[in-house]
Amino acid sequence: SPVVAPAAIVEAPPLSRAPLAYQARQADLREAAARPVLEGKSRRMSGKSAYTTRVEHEGGPPTITKDFSRLGETKAQAKRTADAEELGALVDDAAGLRAPTVIRTGPRSIEESFLEGQSGEEILPWPHRVVPDELLDSDDGRFMGLADLLVGDSDRHAGNWIRLPDGRLAPID
């Protein structure tokens, strides 16, 4: 019989979060999103599949809103895209990644927590944007790849992840 090489072993991240931590972060996000919006402080961001806005709230952290119904998709396509964003955040969290927390604000829209950091586009030089091995081979890099594989996300590019101030990587889309 053929000899099969053993698969590489990747250790799971420590489960340091309480089981309901994501739901608690969602409650915090709902509270922040309910605060009044500061006039003139919100700004449109790039986004190919959604009308994306960074929203500044009175006395609270900024959030990101994404409306998938504004870019010509059918209602069903826009709902599936919003579903994928919501599911992706849950899988990223389960994989131990520091992805934005997501709440559903409508059938075709979401709001998510804003993560401060340096985008992959800022880190990797244009036009080649070759991701260095130390990022790909990091725990966050491997778990981001696994989470993408689990949800069928084939759109992980330099604009869809950031390096957090503590050096960890985070998927943002």
Image: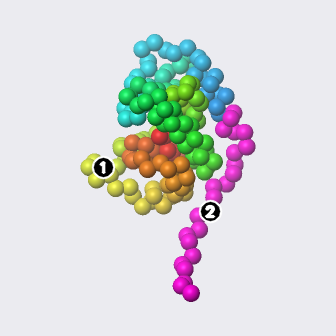
Crowding near the residue tagged with mark 2, few <14, some 14–19, many ≥20 C-alpha atoms within 10 Å:
few
Image coords of residue 118 (percent x, y): 42, 41
What residue lies at 56% left-to-right and 72% top-to-bottom? 7
Amino acid type of the residue that numbered disc 1 sits on in the rendered structure: Pro
Looking at the image, is 140 positioned above or below residue 89? below
Residue 59, quarter of the rendered image? top right
> What predominant SS class does the magenta segment belong to?
loop
Looking at marks 1 and 2 on the same chain, the residue that comes earlier in the sequence is marked by 2
Question: Disc 2 marks which residue?
Answer: 11
Judge whether residue 11 is colored magenta: yes
Amino acid type of the residue that numbered disc 2 sits on in the rendered structure: Glu
Q: Given the current orientation, which residue lies at the most extreme right position?
A: 19
Q: Nearer the viewer, residue 137 or 2?
A: 2
Judge whether residue 14 is colored magenta: yes
Q: Is residue 128 left or right of residue 58?
A: left
Number of the label disc, if any, that sits on residue 125? 1
Colouring convention used in this rendered image of the protein = rainbow
Image coords of residue 23 (percent x, y): 68, 35
Spatial separation of the CA atoms under disc 1 and disc 2:
31 Å
Cβ atoms at labels 1 and 2 below 8 Å apart: no
Image coords of residue 171 (percent x, y): 49, 44
Image coords of residue 115 (percent x, y): 51, 36
Q: Is residue 42 left or right of residue 88?
A: left
What residue lies at 55% left-to-right and 43% top-to-bottom? 88
Looking at the image, is 139 positioned above or below residue 76? below
Helix, strand or loop status at disc 2: loop
What residue lies at 46% left-to-right and 34% top-to-bottom? 77
| Magenta highlight range | 1-24
